[in-house]
Amino acid sequence: MRLTRKLTIAVGLTTALFALSMTTMPALAEDEPGPEGSLEAADTADVPPMALPAVEGIEWQREWEGYGASATESDIAPLAIDVLLDAIDADISRFGGHGADAHEADAGERIGAYLAMRVAGADQEDMERAALAWLAHLLDVPEPPVSSASIGGLDVLALAPPEGMGPLFIYAAGDTVHFISTPEGDAARILAALP
């Protein structure tokens, strides 16, 4: 994968990411076999369904959702979910992800994207560490260029975007990490709507 494509996926969570993930993933049967500890593990009982935050003025489009092994289908392999899980020694059966493009509800103009990734049973520190490892992998750097910021009264990490790309804010809460790639004002509204 070329570095520019990696930057597009990681920094902007842009159209490329959601174009890759447009395919609806089939749910696996609870009794479908899969070796424990591998990407083929199929038990997703520990991963509750996730919902997109309801934000006045923002309409979600091109929604993606994946749980357990179904989240690793080839259409979204560039998401490198295994890197996120390996960073905290977690099994794919504990993974859930949900994201969408963010559009202004009135004008319909795309303003960015949102992606949440959950690892059932992980804590906030684990999720932040996993998010940074994931971004470093996608950007092909030892450490992603992030700084601490406060948006809407919440402590977040802000990824320094390359020229021509929008900001990316990272917020870890409990067992979920949220990636918000919108202007800061919209990011504040999305963060305020999170459970």
Image (cartoon, rainbow, N blue to C red):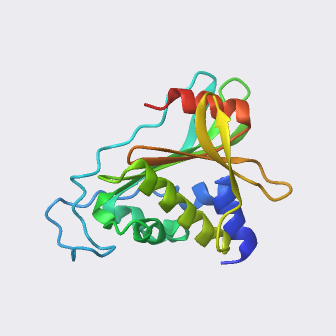
In the image, what residue occupies the spot 63% across and 23% down? Answer: 57
Q: Quadrant of the C terminus?
A: top left
Residue 192: image quadrant is: top right
Pick the front one: 177 or 77: 177
Residue 193 locus on image (x, y percent): 51, 27
Pick the front one: 35 or 167: 167
Residue 15: image quadrant is: bottom right
Q: Quadrant of the N terminus?
A: bottom right
Kindly tell me whether residue 76 is visible in this rendering.
yes
Outermost residue toward the right in this view? 163
Is 33 placed left or right of 189 in the picture? left
Is 26 drawn above or below residue 62 in the view shown?
Answer: below
In the image, what residue occupies the spot 39% across and 44% down? Answer: 174
In the image, what residue occupies the spot 57% across and 61% down? Answer: 132
Residue 179 locus on image (x, y percent): 57, 48
Residue 114 locus on image (x, y percent): 58, 44
How many marks on residues? Answer: 0
Is 96 drawn above or below residue 71 in the view shown?
Answer: above
In the image, what residue occupies the spot 69% across and 40% down? Answer: 182
Is 161 placed left or right of 36 in the picture? right
Residue 72 locus on image (x, y percent): 41, 67
Kindly tell me whether residue 108 is visible in this rendering.
no
Residue 28: image quadrant is: bottom left
Is 142 placed left or right of 119 in the picture? right
Is 36 drawn above or below residue 127 in the view shown?
Answer: below
Is 157 drawn above or below residue 7 in the view shown?
Answer: above
Is 145 placed left or right of 191 in the picture? right
